[in-house]
Amino acid sequence: MPGKVKGRFMSSRFLDNWAVQIRKGLLDLFVLNAIAGRRMYGYDIVRLMSGMGALVLSEGTIYPLLSRLSHEGLIRGSLEESREGPARKYYELTPAGQQTLATMNDVWTSIMRGSALIAKPQSPPQPPPQSQPQSQENAP
């Protein structure tokens, strides 16, 4: 069934797929930003991102993602006892993770700027100035 997007009709399947692809691409960036400068455990990240609409994570998504980021050397985890129940694995960025995150944030900023420029209504291109014909007096 088609959905209406700003006066245009697009299939909801197309939009759903597009949203999934965007979400997949941004989850690493958002999780690394969530961990930057602090230690967090998986469920804390899920709760932090719960108010972010389309980027909501489940526990079934966060732990494989954290495992992959750890395998890539971007984060490290340490198991700590908890007074509130079983031990928790806290994650923090590694130095490589900090460098990678800085680059990822730069790329994301560049993408957002480019998108804003493209989406911004622009004035129509101006025709080049017309050359003035030479008068007969100045002709050789």
Image: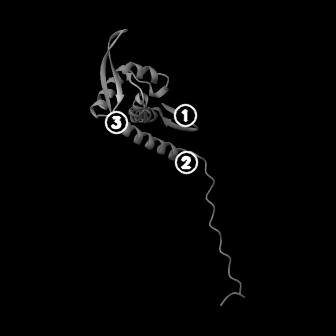
Residue at 33% x, 27% y: name it. 66
Q: Which residue is under mark 3?
A: 95
**Regarding mark 3 in the picture, which secondary structure is present there?**
helix
Q: Quadrant of residue 62?
A: top left
Secondary structure at numbered mark 1: strand
Task: Report the amino acid beneath label 2.
Answer: Leu
CA neighbours of label 1 inside 10 A, class few (<14), some (14 to 19), many (20+): few
Q: Nearer the viewer, mark 3 or mark 2?
A: 3
Looking at the rendered structure, the kind of residue marked 3 is Pro
| Disc nearest the viewer among 3 and 1 | 3
In the rendering, at what x and y percent does residue 17 appear? 41, 34
Q: Is residue 2 left or right of residue 125?
A: left
Alpha carbon separation for disc pair 1 and 2: 24 Å
Provide residue 54's location: percent of width, then percent of height.
47, 28
Q: Nearer the viewer, residue 53 or 124?
A: 53
Q: Earlier in the sequence, mark 1 or mark 2?
A: 1
Mark 2, other Cα within 10 Å: few <14 / some 14–19 / many ≥20: few
Q: Which residue is mark 1?
A: 4
- Residue 121 in the image: state x and y as whole percent: 61, 48
Considering the image in quadrants, where does the C terminus appear? Answer: bottom right
Q: Secondary structure at mark 2?
A: helix
- Residue displayed at 35% across by 35% down: 97
Q: Where does residue 57 sit, x and y in percent of width and height?
A: 41, 24
Question: Does residue 15 appear left or right of residue 84 in this picture?
Answer: right
Q: CA distance from mark 3 to mark 2?
A: 33 Å
Mark 3 crowd level (few <14, some 14–19, many ≥20, 10 Å Cα): few
Tell which circle, 3 or 1, labels the residue nearer the N-terminal end: 1
Q: CA distance from mark 3 to mark 1?
A: 45 Å
Residue of label 2: 117
Residue at 63% x, 61% y is 126
